[in-house]
């Protein structure tokens, strides 16, 4: 079964702390839609500051919502050229080892 996993990689011009704050805002929006308990269970993501990246598993309804809200927020906040999105076939090893949950 194919997984829907997305890696967002940000340019050096984007403060990574602000990217992480944007993940938090996206989580609040998703909790408003799906509820706190379901969001805690199904919102799977990880970040790697050294690689300036955020990985979101969009394999559930909650994950899809998180992915959609996050990309909408970062496009508006940082601009279209401030990041790139990669579709992955699996969760990166470093994220899997960390539990891939935020």
Image (spheres, rainbow, N blue to C red):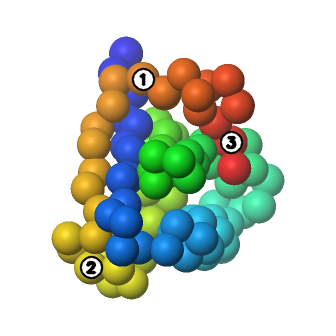
Foreground disc of the pair 1, 2: 2
The answer to which of marks 1 and 3 sits earlier in the sequence is 1
Q: Residue at 37% of width from left, 66% of height from top?
A: 12
Disc 2 vs disc 3: which is toward the camera? 2
Q: Quadrant of residue 44?
A: top right
Q: Secondary structure at mark 1?
A: loop
Which quarter of the rendered picture does the N terminus lie within?
top left
* SS at mark 2 in the image: loop
Disc 1 to disc 3: CB gap under 8 Å: no
Q: Count of labels shown?
A: 3
**Residue 74 in sight from this viewpoint:** no
Give left or right: position of 64 versus 27: left
Which residue is outermost to the right?
Answer: 37
Q: Residue under label 2, please give it.
A: 79
| Residue shown at 79% from the left, 53% from the top | 37
Residue 102 image offset from top left, x and y in percent: 69, 50
Answer left or right for 34 relative to 71: right
First-in-chain label (2 vs 3)? 2
In the picture of the structure, the residue carrying the numbered disc 3 is 101
Measure the alpha-carbon separation of dots 1 and 2.
27 Å
Q: Nearer the viewer, residue 36 or 81?
A: 81
Numbered mark located on residue 7 in the image: none
Q: Name above or below for residue 89 compared with residue 70.
A: above
Q: Residues within 10 Å of mark 1 (few under 14, many from 20)?
A: few
Mark 2–mark 3 Cα distance, whole angstroms, equals 26 Å
For marks 1 and 3, give the CA distance.
15 Å
Instruction: Give the residue number, with chain letter if any, for mark 1.
Output: 90
**Mark 1 and mark 2 residues within 8 Å of each other at the beta carbon:** no
Q: Residue at x 45, y 66 (%)?
A: 70
Looking at the image, is 45 positioned above or below residue 81?
Answer: above
How packed mark 3 is, by other alpha carbons closer than 10 Å (few <14, some 14-19, many 20 or more), is: some
- Report if the CB atoms under discs 2 and 3 are less than 8 Å apart: no
């Amino acid at each position: 079964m194919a997984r829907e996993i997305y890696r967002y990689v940000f340019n050096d011009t984007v403060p990574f702390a602000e990217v992480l704050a944007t993940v938090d805002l996206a989580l609040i929006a998703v909790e408003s839609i799906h509820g706190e308990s379901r969001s805690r269970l199904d919102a799977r993501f990880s970040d790697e500051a050294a690689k300036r990246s955020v990985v979101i598993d969009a394999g559930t309804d909650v994950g899809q919502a998180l992915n959609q809200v996050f990309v909408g927020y970062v496009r508006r906040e940082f601009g279209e050229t401030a990041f790139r999105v990669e579709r992955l076939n699996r969760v990166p090893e470093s994220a899997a080892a960390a539990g891939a949950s935020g």
